[in-house]
Amino acid sequence: MTDKKPFAWETAIAWKNKDRIVVRGYDVNELTGNISFAEHFHLVLRGELPTPEVGRMTEAILVNMAEHAMSPSSATVRFATSGGAELNAAVAAGVAGIGRLHGTADRPAEMFLAVGERAERDGLSDREAAAKVVAEMRERRERMPGFHHAQHIRDPRTARLLELSDELGVTGRYVGIARAMEDATEDVFGRRIWINGPGSMGCVGLDMGYEPLQLKAMFIVCRSLSLCAHSIEEATREKGWRASTNSDMVQPLDLSMQGPDHYDGPADRSLT
Ligand SMILES: CC(C)(COP(=O)(O)OP(=O)(O)OC[C@H]1O[C@@H](n2cnc3c(N)ncnc32)[C@H](O)[C@@H]1OP(=O)(O)O)[C@@H](O)C(=O)NCCC(=O)NCCS
């Protein structure tokens, strides 16, 4: 039994009245101009402002994972937009395309947690438990979430995220478990199966104290930026209905369609 009123929402996230908006106890106008979006992401989802290191690492992940050219979600957005869907509807279709095999930061996080629990339960070191889990999953022909990338094989985002996590002192038990699993693939597969971007989000995110679902939210939030850009570009540069007799259907996820021959934005440049 609960003493809550039926049909009444209660929330620990925010409140507002005619004059004020208060988020997790802070007036939104005090937050505005004083914290980064990454710090706000942490505050809204987790209830507290992050440490400077967690704030920077969160920011880095939001930038690193925001845009990825043609992927299942951006291609979905483009097809939805080509049918005339409004921006919000097209972006919602793209978000729906994020799943078990794409943008899956929560599933690798669940797996790394399970490896940690296995080590404790069976009295193994984390490295031993990692090696056992890799071997068992291979035996069952089960794909390890957060490993391998269909388009890159070795995902170029991973090294940068793990390097930053080391530099900022964020790296802890779960980055160790992910690295141990990657090492174990050499024996089990006879070749290295690399941690991918969402896999690095999974382990670095756990070491920052995020829950798996909060990591999935992090992916949705940053990738929505890309989904908006792809929808707006599709709506403003293409005439719609992509596969008509006047425009060929292409396989947008084929890497040959994603290279510089199909890119007409600015040439390579640097922040320095
Ligand atoms: C994304 C994915 C579907 C890509 O698959 P793909 O490039 O078509 O690769 P294949 O499924 O053909 O796998 C080729 C081989 O690589 C290995 N492999 C690929 N991904 C693997 C993974 N996640 N775990 C273990 N082995 C993997 C296997 O040896 C496989 O050979 P097998 O079929 O004989 O077992 C797959 O890697 C996967 O399911 N990854 C986990 C989900 C994930 O992290 N997604 C986020 C991507 S950003």
Image (cartoon, rainbow, N blue to C red):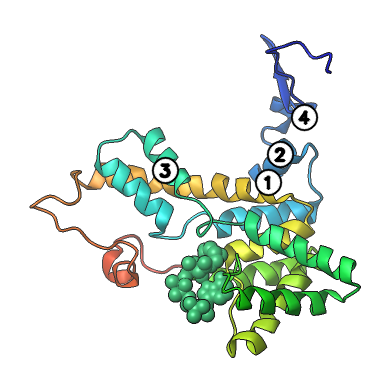
Q: Is residue 133 above or below residue 207?
A: below
For disc 1, the marked residue is 214
Q: Which of the two labelled residues, at mark 3 and mark 4, occupies the earlier sequence position?
A: 4
Q: What element carries label 4?
A: loop
Single out the mark in the foreground, 4 or 1. 1
Q: Which of the two labelled residues, at mark 2 and mark 1, occupies the earlier sequence position?
A: 2
Single out the mark in the foreground, 1 or 3. 1
Disc 1 marks which amino acid?
Gln
Position of the C terminus, as image quadrant, is bottom right
Q: In this orientation, does residue 207 appear?
A: yes
Q: In which quarter of the image is residue 107?
A: bottom right
- What residue is shown at x 62% (from left), y 57% (from top)? 105
- What residue is shown at x 33% (from left), y 33% (from top)? 86
Work out how far the residue at label 4 is from the one at label 1, CA to CA, in angstroms.
17 Å
For disc 3, the marked residue is 228
Tell me whether circle 2 and circle 3 mark residues in contact (CB < 8 Å): no
Disc 3 marks which amino acid?
Cys
Looking at the rendered structure, which numbered label has been put on residue 24? 4
For disc 2, the marked residue is 45
Disc 4 marks which amino acid?
Arg
User: Dot 3: within a 10 Å radius of its alpha carbon, few (fewer than 14), some, or many (20 or more) residues?
Assistant: many
- What residue is shown at x 70% (from left), y 76% (from top)? 181
Tell me whether circle 2 and circle 1 mark residues in contact (CB < 8 Å): yes
Q: What element carries label 3?
A: helix
